[in-house]
Amino acid sequence: MSKHPGAGNHTVDPRIVASGKGAMVYDGNLPATPTLAWFDRDWWLSRDALRTAAGGRGGVAHLDTPVGACVLRHYHRGGWMAPLLDDRYVWNGRSRNRGFAEFRLLGELAARGLPVPAPVAARYLRRGPYYTADLITRAIENAQTLTEVIQSQRFDAALAEQVGALIARFHAAGVDHADLNAHNILAAGGALWLVDFDRGELRVSGTAWKLANLARFKRSLLKVGACDHDETTLDREIWTPLMRAYERTLGTEA
């Protein structure tokens, strides 16, 4: 697998700043200190620093910030709760809000040298019994999602082995990704990255969660069109080399 540029061990120094009905956490090791304005897309737009923005669940904005290219994500609900609560979550305390939790997890994974986007800042805003949340991370420049790679007919056995090894590295570290799918693996410069750790967690042991991750990922490959949605072909051409590399890497990393 290609070496990950910028994916060396990165130490995050979390600093929390309370403000009105919410709070922000940011990495104190950054060359510039984020402010609450950084979570406002219009603020970046007024400075001609908003590159692209996408709506919907997991909609993101790509920013040119004083610390480099970053991604701003506003948390939205999915599933049947989305029409009811949209971007609101029930307040269960500062340490358990979605943005702060993902910031902490990304900081831990970055410190271990795993290929994840480094966290920059996160914030929450209280609204009665609910809150909303946002997260800013470093951008993975010039990246394509695995979905885009698949749909351009460039997903072969060699890349499948890279993907299998990537997943195994995270599983060996006890990382349970809550939404492992083809949209959350990025390819850039010959290397692979895993993104979107909302509701992710670190586990001490166990195999059931690893198998569930893999099953979810396999379903996503078929859903986005790998091997023309044909599971028999996928098993032969993609899943077999993927799992071979997964098992080999898991044995090495254990």
Image (spheres, helix red, strand yellow):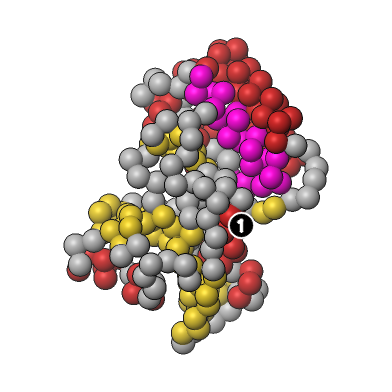
Q: Is residue 50 left or right of residue 228?
A: left
Q: In the rendered structure, which segment of residues is drawn in magenta?
A: 158-179
| Crowdedness near tag 1: few (<14), some (14–19) or many (≥20) residues, C-alpha within 10 Å | some
Which residue corresponds to the image point at 48% horizontal and 55% vertical from the top-left? 118
Query: Residue 27: horizontal and vertical position, in percent?
Result: 48, 68
Q: Which residue is mark 1?
A: 108
Which residue corresponds to the image point at 61% horizontal and 75% vertical from the top-left? 94
State yes or no: residue 176 in magenta.
yes
In the image, 49 versus 94, the foreground residue is 49
> Amino acid type of disc 1?
Glu
Is residue 113 something that shows in the picture?
yes
Q: Is residue 39 left or right of residue 80?
A: left
Query: Residue 166: horizontal and vertical position, in percent?
Result: 58, 35
Residue 163 location, quadrant: top right
**Vertical relation: 122 (above or below) 5:** below
Q: Main secondary structure of the magenta part?
A: helix
Task: Indicate the quadrant containing the C terminus: top left, top right, bottom left or bottom right.
Answer: top right
Q: Residue furthest right?
A: 206
State yes or no: residue 216 in magenta.
no
